[in-house]
Image (cartoon, rainbow, N blue to C red):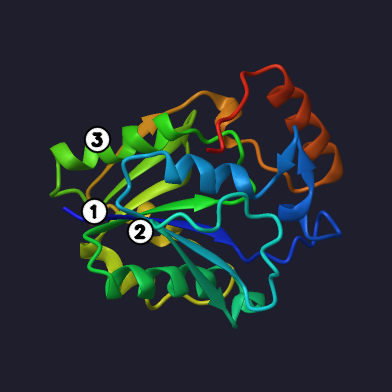
Amino acid sequence: MRTAGIVLAAGQSRRMGKDKINLALSGAPLGSYAVNAALHSSLDLVILVVRADDPLCWLVNPLNDRLIITRCTDSKLGMSHSLRCGMNEAVDRGADCVLILLADQPLVQTEHINALLSVYSLAPELHYVSAKDGDVVKPPLLLSSKVYSVISKLEGDTGARSIIRNPAYLGEQISFEKEVFYDADTPDALLYLGELMDSCKEIDFS
C-alpha cells in the first residue's frame, strides 16, 4: 500500500490579515510544523500544496527526497482546488490513500498521523479514517482511493465533509486530545499556540 500525505498550505489567510504560514511560532515558521510531522511519519511521500507565488522561504527542509511541492494556480478559488491539486499529484504517483493535513495546525504530531495510517492498514475496506474532537470530525483525515472520484468533483471552499457526512461511506474515527486541532487563524490564536508549544518539548526538524 502506497501512502501519500497532502499538506494544504495555499490558503489566503484572510482572518489573519497576512500570510500566516510564514509567521514565527516557537522558533520556526508556522507552516513548517505540519510538513515536519508528515516527513517524520510512516507516509511514503508528502505532497505540499502551495500558492503559485509562494517563495517557500518558510520551508525548513525543502530538499527531502520524500517531499513533492505542488503549486496550485487556482488556490484563491477555495480549498477544494488546493485539495484537487494535491490529489492529482497523489494519483499520478500511485497513492492508494491520502492523508490530508492543514499547514496551520502545528500541534498535529507524527504519532497522530501514524495512528490514522495504522487503522487504515488493518481495515483497507474503509473509505476514510478521520480524527475527532469530541463529537466533531476534523483534520487530519485519511481518504481511500475509493473516494478519489468524489474529491475530484468538489467545488469552492469545501473539503471532504460530503464524504464524512454520507452514511454510504464506511469510516473510522479516532479521538485525539483537543489541543491537536488548534489552528492559527487569528493573531490571538497564534499567540496562544506559541504559549502551548513553548511549554512542550523541542520539535526535531532534522
Contact? badges 1 and 2 (CB < 8 Å):
yes
Q: Nearer the viewer, mark 2 or mark 3?
A: 3
Looking at the image, which residue is at 50% across and 58% down?
63
Secondary structure type for disc 3: helix
Q: Who comes first in sequence, dot 1 or dot 2? A: 1
Looking at the image, which residue is at 79% across and 49% down?
23
**In the figure, is residue 194 to the left or right of 83?**
right
Q: Is residue 158 visible?
A: no
**In the figure, is residue 3 to the left or right of 64?**
left
Q: Who comes first in sequence, dot 2 or dot 3? A: 3
Give me the C-alpha separation between circle 1 and circle 3. Answer: 14 Å
Q: Nearer the viewer, mark 1 or mark 3?
A: 3
Q: Which residue is mark 1?
A: 127
> Disc 2 marks which amino acid?
Ile
Q: Where does residue 34 sit, x and y in percent of width and height?
A: 55, 45
> Disc 3 marks which amino acid?
Ser
Residue 86 to residue 3: above or below? below
Give me the C-alpha separation between circle 2 and circle 3. Answer: 20 Å
Q: Where does residue 168 sit, x and y in percent of width and height?
A: 23, 57
Q: Nearer the viewer, mark 1 or mark 2?
A: 1
Give me the C-alpha separation between circle 1 and circle 2. Answer: 9 Å
Q: Which residue is mark 3?
A: 118
Q: Which residue is mark 2?
A: 163
Q: Who comes first in sequence, dot 1 or dot 3? A: 3
> Disc 1 marks which amino acid?
His
Residue 47 to residue 123: above or below? below
How many residues crowd mark 2 within 10 Å: few (<14), some (14–19), many (20+)?
some
Q: Nearer the viewer, residue 158 or 193?
A: 193
